[in-house]
Amino acid sequence: MVKWAVAFVRYALAFVLILIGAIALSWVAFHYISAAWFDREAREALANIREAPRSESAPTPDTMSVGEPIGTLEITRVGLTGVVVEGDSTEVLDRAIGHLPDTPLPWKEGNSALAAHRDTIFRPLKGVRLGDVLRLKTPHGDFDYRVTETLIVKPEEVWVLDPTPVTTLTLISCWPFNYIGHAPERFIVRAERIPTVSVASHRTE
């Protein structure tokens, strides 16, 4: 009787562990598929906006609605690519790179900040180096930036969002990259705007 009870407990425990694993895998698969679908839809929306005729004198927007696509970010050398949308909520960051609403939009002057999760879109940032070129493609122009510094700060060190004397792109992600749970610090990449080069030249960086 005791042996039967022990065997039953073992089988029950194994079943529970398998069930938990299946649920976890299903959640990851759903999250991945949802993010991929959002990425595709956002890129199509951006392509349609870029192709639509517009007046040369039309002003660029100063604000955008949360969840509205802004453009795409690429860092060719480290293989990073992702859609940038307005907002920094969990819902936004679970699917895309978020633009912090309190900072200027990329086509404006100042310090524009983008954030994303370290274990998804911004994971390639762990390989970024000084001098790497970032390209931000938007319906209001393509903009290139060169990485000038990387640093690690505490979450409360919001000075990284302060205005800068030159047009800057600040990328924010959690750190360490291999940390399990809520990471205690933030990884910052600062890049200054440079003259936009041709696509062919950009790929040789």
Image (cartoon, grey):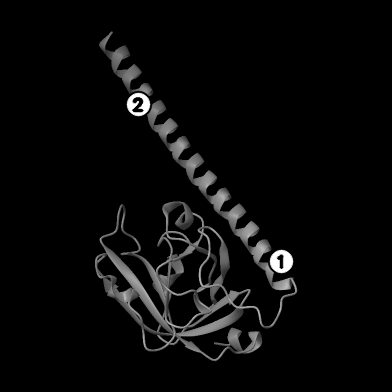
Counting from the top left corner in percent of width and height, residue 49 is at 68, 68
Q: Secondary structure at mark 1?
A: helix
Q: Which mark is residue 13?
A: 2
Q: Amino acid at mark 2?
A: Leu
Rendered residue at 69%/72% (across/down): 50
Q: Residue at x 31, y 54 (%)?
A: 180
Q: Label 2: state its secondary structure.
A: helix
Q: Tally the marks.
A: 2
Where is 8 relative to 25, above or below?
A: above
* Quadrant of res 160: bottom left
Tag 1: amino acid: Asn
Q: Which mark is residue 48?
A: 1
Judge left or right: residue 64 versus residue 102: right
Q: Nearer the viewer, residue 22 or 95?
A: 95
Residue neighbourhood size for the residue with mark 1, other residues' Cα within 10 Å, grouped as few (<14), some (14–19), many (≥20): few
Q: Residues within 10 Å of mark 2 (few under 14, many from 20)?
A: few
In-front residue for pair 148/181: 148
- Judged from this view, the residue extending furthest toward the bottom is 195
Residue at image position (39%, 28%) is: 16
Q: Quadrant of the N terminus?
A: top left
Does residue 151 appear left or right of residue 73 in this picture? left
